[in-house]
Amino acid sequence: VQLQASGGGLVQPGGSLRLSCAASGVTLDFYNIGWFRQAPGKEREGISCISSTSANDGTAYYTHSVEDRFSISRDNVENAAYLQMNSLNPEDTAVYYCALGAFGSTSCSLHESNFHRWGQGTQVTVSS
């Protein structure tokens, strides 16, 4: 099982990025997917997750700091997950990771212990 996050880069404040999480060796449809980030000198934090669509339509959760700006989604045909990030600000600068969570769950939470497989991160830098 491998996850690979991509789509990061340098963006100006107020800009947007779309991160992708590609999976191999696993069908993402059956699992919760989470997005986490780690800023320099800070602990990794969960920012969004989406529950398995095999259990329901997939319920999304967001941490407060991003809930009005970020949107998580998944494409079961592409076997990928996405994080659309809008209105980015310098505080969003971090390495972003996608992670695989519980199987067949109708809900998800943003605690790291709920995710068991992690992809390599992608750097997002918000700066003018």
Image: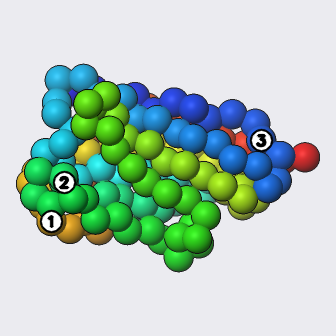
Residue 110: x %, y % from top left: 35, 65
Question: Disc 3 designates what residue?
Answer: 11
Tag 1 residue:
106
- Badge 1 local density, few (<14 within 10 Å), some, or many (20+)? some
Which residue sits at x=44%, y=43%?
A: 82
Q: Position of residue 122 (x, y in %)?
A: 55, 34
Query: With 97 as the anchor, is 11 left or right in this view?
Result: right
Disc 2 and disc 1 in contact, CB within 8 angstroms: yes
Q: Earlier in the sequence, mark 2 or mark 1?
A: 2
Distance, label 3 to label 2, CA atoms, is 31 Å
Q: Is residue 106 above or below residue 81?
A: below
- One can see residue 112 in this view: no
Kind of residue at badge 3: Val
| Mark 3 or 2, nearer chain start | 3
Camera-side residue of 39 and 22: 22
- Residue to which mark 2 is pinned: 52
The residue shown at (82%, 53%) is 13
For badge 2, the amino acid type reads Ser
Q: Are marks 3 and 2 in contact (CB under 8 Å)?
A: no
- Judged from the image, the secondary structure of the residue bearing numbered disc 3 is strand
Query: What is the CA distance from the residue labelled 2 to the residue labelled 1?
Result: 6 Å
